[in-house]
Amino acid sequence: MKVDEFDFELPRDLIAERPAVPRDAAKLLNVEAEQFHDLVVRDLPALLAPGDVMVFNDTRVIPARLKGRRGEAGIEVTLHEQIALDRWKVFAKGAKKLKAGQEITFAPGFSAMVEEKGEAGEVTLRFNRAGPDLVAALERHGEMPLPPYIKREGGADERDRKDYQTVYAREDGAVAAPTAGLHFTPELLAALDARGIKRVTVTLHVGAGTFLPVKVEDTAEHKMHSERGFISAEAAEAINAARAAGGRVVAVGTTSLRLLESAADENGMLAPYAGSTDIFITPGYRFRIVDLLMTNFHLPRSTLFMLVCAFAGMDRMKSAYAHAMRHGYRFYSYGDSSLLRREGLA
């Protein structure tokens, strides 16, 4: 498909710079077959049925943006894919001037060696810290990797360290937040439990590639960056049991959906999963397991807008986005949310 088909005009003042307070006070657009209902996120439990299973991504965002120096030259890198305990693929500003074997110093005693250069500003770095020691160094010297459309003078601030993290984040490794999950509060999770909604966590470590623009003219030519995902035996069993009992699978965010769709077999059954996925979902994809999707409002021409068009129908989503803009919904990572039904689902 032509990428131009997924374009739309978005006023700059609809891009959220900060999240709603409290988190579950954000708007929620309930998208049904022919109707749009303007609600708030805390209304979510009433939209679901006892026996439904919600799937949350429990990845935790690490402060993955680092500023350092190579000699006199300033270098900024954003980690996006871990390939070993001490090695990451990164996007680097000024990558053209970097060469294999050069050292970048981020702080006294904290540095990395350039191992190889890839395409489009991608570089592989080997840090002088590994595992938990590397995460500790990132927590001390790194910044939260806010998306490029959030304009913050001086970069991410201390408030972002809390705001750009879900309340249930547990597994270190993401360099972008699973933003649909940012709307949940302990009170909302308790309300879902009281409603009889099953809650399950999976892990997909979201990479910075999620923000990269689609630069090709045809979707068939776009290559997704790979991300690591994990589904435990207990989570797979709980989701399979809910489906067998007639419950719907509700993915909280496109990250949960992409992991579930990567792991499910042709019959929509799950087994434990540990591996990488570069799944790219566009209209025409046959969904195997996800029935409902809670997700924020995405960038024009982005792989995520393509995904929601594939899930709920292109015409329906273009109408939903037009409705959202007319009614002042806030877009992108810190913005408002929507609840979508898979096309053809009653």
Image (spheres, rainbow, N blue to C red):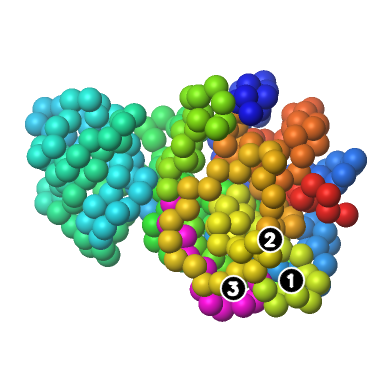
Mark 1 vs mark 3, CA separation in Å:
11 Å
Relative image position of residue 167 (x, y in whole percent) = 55, 61
Relative image position of residue 6 (x, y in whole percent) = 66, 27
Give me the residue at 59% from left, 73% from top.
236
82 relative to 261 in the view: left or right? left
**In the rendering, which numbered label is found on residue 236?**
3
In the rendered view, tell whether residue 78 sits above or below residue 9: below
Mark 2 vs mark 1, CA separation in Å:
9 Å
Tally the marks: 3
- Residue interval drawn in magenta: 227-239
The amino acid pointed to by label 1 is Arg
**In the rendering, which numbered label is found on residue 243?**
1
Q: What residue is disc 2 on?
A: 289
The amino acid pointed to by label 3 is Ala
Q: Could you classify mark 2 by the number of other residues whose Cα lies within 10 Å: few (under 14), some (14-19), or many (20 or more)?
A: many
Q: Secondary structure at mark 3?
A: helix
Mark 2 vs mark 3, CA separation in Å:
12 Å
